[in-house]
Every structure is written in C-alpha cells, then in structure tokens.
Image (cartoon, rainbow, N blue to C red):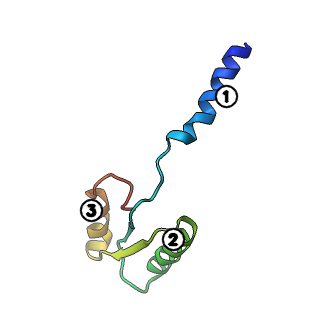
Amino acid sequence: MKKVLFVFLVLALSIGIFAAKYPTKPVTIICPWGAGGGTDRLARFLADQLSKELGKPFVVVNRTGGGGAVGHAAGAYAKPDGYTL
C-alpha cells in the first residue's frame, strides 16, 4: 500500500514539471456584440484582469452581426490552440 501511495504522490507532484507556460503570446477574446454594451464592458474588464494576473496581453475583438452569429462562428472556427476565447 505504501508503494502505491508513493507512486501516486510522485505522479501528482511531477505533473507541474511538464506543464507548459500559458500564455506565451497575446490571447484574443471575441465579443459577439457591439462595442460599449454590457457584454463588451465585461469582456474588457476580464481582459484587463487576466492581463494583470498572467502578464500577457488579452485583446478584445468585437465581431458583430447576425444577432451574435458572426462572433460565435469566429470563435467556433478559430484555431483550437487556446489563444482565442
């Protein structure tokens, strides 16, 4: 039992060693509604807080039109690398 516990402890502690630093480049936040609205202000507030916390720029991009469909499609078809939210 002690060996099993030791193995799990070693595995749990070693996970952080292999974790990549994130983010390594600017992150884009897509806001599917117009600039100046409540959603835009919230997105910009979150971008500002994340930039301060993680030390990398978070950029808000407004993609309006189609009742939000244009922005949602831009997010859905973005490269799935974690740099577009």
Q: Which residue is drawn at 37% across and 60% down?
A: 83
19 or 32: nearer the viewer: 19
Q: Which of marks 2 and 1 is nearer the N terminus?
A: 1
Instruction: Give residue 53's position: percent from left, percent from top.
Output: 57, 67
Q: How crowded is mark 2: few (under 14 residues within 10 Å), some or many (20 or more)?
A: some
Q: Residues within 10 Å of mark 1 (few under 14, many from 20)?
A: few
Identify whether 3 is placed above or below 22.
above
Position of 2 compared to 83: left or right? right
Q: Residues within 10 Å of mark 3 (few under 14, many from 20)?
A: few
Which numbered disc covers residue 73?
A: 3
Q: Which residue is drawn at 73% across and 13% down?
A: 1
Helix, strand or loop at mark 2: helix
**Total marks in image:** 3
Q: Which residue is drawn at 38% across and 84% down?
A: 35
Which numbered disc covers residue 9?
A: 1
- The residue pinned by badge 2 equals 51
51 or 33: nearer the viewer: 51
Q: Earlier in the sequence, mark 1 or mark 3?
A: 1
Determine whether label 2 and label 1 are within 8 Å by CB. Answer: no
- As measured in the structure, the alpha-carbon distance from the residue carrying label 2 to the one carrying label 1 is 33 Å
Q: Earlier in the sequence, mark 3 or mark 2?
A: 2
Instruction: Give residue 46's position: percent from left, percent from top.
Output: 52, 72
Name the amino acid, label 3: Ala
Instruction: Give residue 61's position: percent from left, percent from top.
Output: 34, 75
